[in-house]
Image (tube, grey):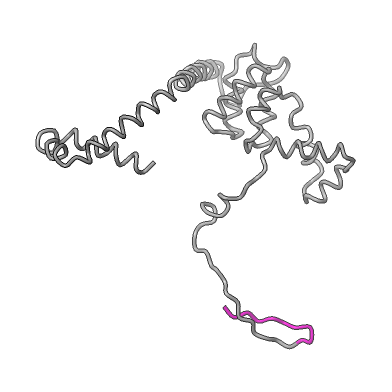
Amino acid sequence: MDICVLRSCGSAATLSLVCLVATDDEAFTYNKRVSRIATIQEHRMILNAVKKGVSEERLARALNVDIASIRKKRNLLVGICPEAAELLKDRHVPIHVFTELRFMKPVRQVEAAMAMVTMNRFSVSYARSLVASTPDDQLVAGKPRRMAGLTEDQVATMQRESENVDRQLRAVEQTYSSDQYDLMLAAGYVNRLLGNVRIVRYLAQHHADILTEFQKLSDLQKAA
């Protein structure tokens, strides 16, 4: 690619450069490989800088952000129990999620953080739904907790569904490792069967439906 370069004398010269042009959508390639700092880690870095004497104004100028943003990040874990913070320390969590967590008592904060980690959902809307489905006795006294447009019956239904989902998640967590191991062994055995020409021929002649399911299982394992 030829680029016109203006020199200090005012004349122009042509410089030949080799340029790499990517046609891929960067949202699915390069940005995916950027190592972004977790929210709580950023909070700790700001605290550490302030303790060493760096002013909030100087931090705001250096990071090119509003000083209010620096203060929000500095006070990120105020009202958050240590156990919940530990669960979220390596996650990219929106700041307003911590605002929602403050509506809940420590035990419920931990349950909410565990739910977010398990579901891999850290959005503000999901945090609000967890608050809305929290019983009154697990909320901090004097803080509002109703989502706009929800009736008491709808909130009660959300609470029941949330409790059911929590129980199901815990049941899955208890059996996940053993189920995954059994699935791995079964898939390996099926692949060995499909590697035998005589077995494949017999299944094709007498049990075509079973052969189809075996092939689907093998394809899923290869795709994973």
Q: Quadrant of residue 116?
A: top right
Residue at image point 39% right, 27% down: 181
Q: Quadrant of residue 147?
A: top right
Q: Position of residue 120 (x, y in %)?
A: 54, 33
Q: Position of residue 94 (x, y in %)?
A: 65, 37
Is 109 left, or right, of 71 in this rendering?
A: left
Residue at image point 57% right, 72% down: 19
* Count of marks, rendered view: 0
Is 125 left, or right, of 70 in this rendering?
A: left
Viewer-side residue, 50 vs 78: 50
Q: Position of residue 60 (x, y in %)?
A: 81, 47
Farthest residue, direction top:
137
Viewer-side residue, 125 vs 54: 54
Q: Is residue 6 magenta?
A: yes
Is 118 left, or right, of 39 in this rendering?
A: left
Residue at image point 63% right, 13% down: 136
Q: Position of residue 28 (x, y in %)?
A: 51, 52
Residue at image point 58% right, 32% down: 125
Picture quarter with the N terminus = bottom right
Viewer-side residue, 199 vs 45: 199
- Which segment did they paint magenta? 1-10
Is 141 left, or right, of 127 in this rendering?
A: right
Q: Is residue 75 magenta?
A: no
